[in-house]
Structures are given as C-alpha cells and as structure tokens.
C-alpha cells in the first residue's frame, strides 16, 4: 500500500446547535437527510482499521448531537484506533461526561474564540456559550479527560489571543491549536486576517511555545502556519507538504470523501461516497486525491511557482492555497520574510471599532459590549 490514512477527521453529523460566523461547513440546526447510519459508520471503521488508520477525530457540526457518538467512539477503540473529539462544548455536562469517561478519548477539543464572554458568544451565535466552555474544561479535568482548545482567528478576535491564553492557563488547559479562518462557508473575505496579522500570530505562537512552556504541552498553528523560512521552521519545523489524501483523510456525515475535512470545494471531493464504494477501494484508487498524489510543480501559481521550496512545500495547506483559485498560498511566513507585505492594506495589524463594525454588522450586529470595550480604553 503506497499510502496509509494515519489520521481521519470525521464529520459524523452536519447538525449544530450554534451559528458561528466563521463556520467553513456552513452547518445548520437540521441534519442532512442522508446522514450515515450507525451500521454504515461501523463498516467505515472496519475499512479504516484495514487501511492502517491510527487515530480518528469525531467532529461536526456538533458531534455530541448524534445519539450514537458513544457507540461510534467505542467501536473505533475496539478496532485498535485512538479517538478524540472536536466540540463547541455546549453539551458537555454530567450526562455526556459519563459516556466520555467510559470512552476515555485521547483528547476532547473545544472551540474557544475569545477570552471575553461577550465576544466568544457573539462569534458562536449563542449567549452563555463562553461560560459553558469554562465549565466544560473543569468537568473534563475532574473526570480525567484531557481538554484541548481550537481557536479560529479573524479580524474581530485577533487582539484576543493574549486573553485566550490567560483563560487557558487559568483553566489548566495544556493543548492549544491556533488557526486563522478562510472565507468559505459563512465567513467572508473582509473578515480574514491580514498578512501582517498572520505574521504577528506566528510570533505569538512561537512566544507562547517558548515563554509559557510550563503551562502548555502543545501550542501549534495547525497546517495553516509556515512554511519554511526562519520563523516557519521555528514554529513547526521543516514543512514537507500537505498530507491530505496521503496520510490524512476527511469524511462527511453523508459519506463524502476528501483528503482533508477542511477541503470544502467540490474539486477536492472524491466522485464516490462510502455508499458507492468501500473506503478501502476509494483510498487505494490511483485516481483518488490527484491534487497531492499526482502533484507536479506545474500546478503551482503565483509566488509559490518560483519559490525555492516549491517542490517540497507544494504551496503549503491545500485549502489555503486554493482559496482564490490556482494553487498559491497567500499566507506564508517565508514569503513575508523575503518579499514583505503585498499591499498597504495587508500590512495593517489594528482596525478601529468603526472599521470592524462596518465589516461585521452586515453579518450579525455587534453587541453593545463591543463598543463599551473601546470606551474603557
């Protein structure tokens, strides 16, 4: 077997009980009518075990909304694979923790997008969600379950990174993934961070890794941070290309297959679902995941095409590199080191309240607390 899907991120449900402004999947409160059945999920798990998969992350939507999440997780473990979760934390309570305690997942990931309640609640579209996240941290730790955090950053919460760090240190959460949001799903291009903010985030990640190591076991920028160059290699080492369809795999709640769950564009979704063919056959098909398995530097565009790391880096994260068409990553630490920022707008780090209001109010009206924060300064 030329490739093995070491890690799978699985959207076991499309349904979600929140309405996040940056949701890349554009999930809704209503499940798709063609969600995989429990039996179909179990067949996929057997296929993954046969393929040599090592760990599975159950995601959504909100995975705890699916009534059989415990059975799916237990079946994964029964086949010798590790299991973890990515959740919004809203349904972590005494009842669900009993199930999780029996499963003992490797980690239970919760999204935290601000260090202040009013802003996290606004971004997540649900009042009281910040307080529930904090309670979830304590409940998980009390029951011997490792909490981790994923923070998705855009212009509105860029300045919140130090405050999120404080919350995590206080809550004794030691695993933290920091990523920026792309303008897919519900997120708009105007809300995306600038190149200068991306650079500052890289410095923040490195600073947290070095100066706060007694508080954190892992702080990383996922696969959207890099690539190569001085700062990129300090953050995550030498980048050797995206592993989507090579060592990683993503599954939709309807059985759709892609090399990585974050690859939402139709061009990256394989033509067969797990209802059409077995996952083993799809994975082993030489025509699957062409964008990585049959990569050639001629696929690259823009700056990435002439970069000295082109053949190794392959434009970094495929999702980020393809967001504007072609295959050229607009966010690259090495490129910034060599070329600087591409425009005056991309060189900006701070935005005033009026600018942020103009960007975000068309999506969802900002709360009064947003304006009062500026009045206090």
Image (cartoon, rainbow, N blue to C red):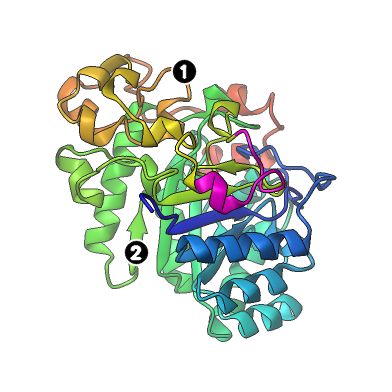
Query: Does the segment drawn in magenta span residue 281?
Result: yes
Residue 275, image x, y percentages: 72, 47
In percent of the image, x 31 and y 51: which residue is there? 205
Query: Of helix, strand and loop, which one carries label 1?
Result: loop
Residue 54, image x, y percentages: 45, 66
In percent of the image, x 72 and y 58: which residue is there? 128
Q: Which residue is mark 2?
A: 218
Query: Does the segment drawn in magenta span residue 345?
Result: no
Is residue 289 at all visible to an observer of this figure? yes
Start and end of the magenta stretch? 271-283
Query: Gap in Å between the C-alphas at discs 2 and 1?
Result: 33 Å
Instruction: Return the residue nearer the eye: 120 or 62.
Output: 62
Query: Of helix, strand and loop, which one carries label 2?
Result: strand
In percent of the image, x 20 and y 50: which residue is there? 237
Is residue 92 at all visible to an observer of this figure? no
Residue 280, image x, y percentages: 55, 53
Q: Which residue is mark 1?
A: 325
Residue 127, image x, y percentages: 74, 53
In percent of the image, x 69 and y 24: which residue is there? 362
Left or right: where does residue 112 sit relative to residue 158?
A: right
């Amino acid at each position: 077997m030329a490739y093995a899907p070491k890690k799978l991120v699985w959207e076991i449900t499309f349904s979600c009980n929140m309405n996040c402004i940056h949701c890349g999947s554009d999930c809704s409160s209503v499940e798709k009518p063609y969600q995989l059945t429990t039996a179909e999920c179990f067949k996929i798990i057997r296929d993954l075990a046969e393929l040599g998969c090592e760990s599975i992350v159950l995601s959504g939507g909100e995975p705890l909304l699916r009534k059989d999440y415990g059975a799916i997780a237990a079946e994964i473990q029964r086949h010798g694979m590790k299991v973890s979760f990515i959740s919004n934390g809203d349904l972590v309570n005494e009842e669900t923790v009993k199930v999780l305690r029996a499963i003992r997942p490797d980690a239970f990931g919760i999204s935290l997008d601000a260090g202040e309640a009013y802003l996290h609640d606004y971004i997540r579209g649900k009042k009281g969600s910040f307080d529930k996240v904090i309670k979830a941290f304590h409940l998980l730790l009390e029951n011997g379950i490792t909490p981790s955090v994923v923070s998705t950053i855009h212009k509105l919460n860029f300045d919140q990174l130090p405050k999120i760090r404080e919350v995590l240190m206080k809550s004794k959460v030691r695993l933290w993934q920091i990523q920026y949001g792309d303008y897919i799903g519900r997120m708009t291009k105007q809300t995306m961070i600038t190149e200068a903010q991306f650079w500052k985030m890289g410095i923040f990640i490195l600073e947290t890794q070095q100066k706060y190591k007694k508080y954190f076991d892992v702080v990383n920028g996922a696969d959207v941070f890099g690539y190569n160059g001085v700062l990129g290699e300090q953050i995550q080492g030498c980048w050797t290309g995206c592993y989507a369809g090579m060592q990683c795999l993503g599954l939709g709640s309807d059985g759709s297959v892609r090399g990585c769950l974050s690859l939402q564009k139709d061009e990256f979704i394989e033509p067969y679902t797990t209802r059409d063919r077995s996952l083993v056959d799809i994975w082993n098909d030489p025509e699957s995941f062409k964008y990585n398995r049959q990569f050639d530097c001629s696929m690259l565009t823009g700056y990435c095409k002439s970069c000295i790391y082109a053949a190794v880096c392959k434009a970094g994260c495929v999702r980020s590199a393809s967001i504007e068409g072609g295959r050229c990553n607009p966010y690259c630490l090495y490129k910034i080191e060599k070329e600087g920022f591409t425009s005056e707008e991309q060189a900006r780090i701070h935005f005033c309240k009026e600018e942020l209001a103009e960007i975000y109010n068309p999506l969802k009206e900002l709360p009064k607390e947003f304006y009062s924060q500026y009045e206090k300064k």
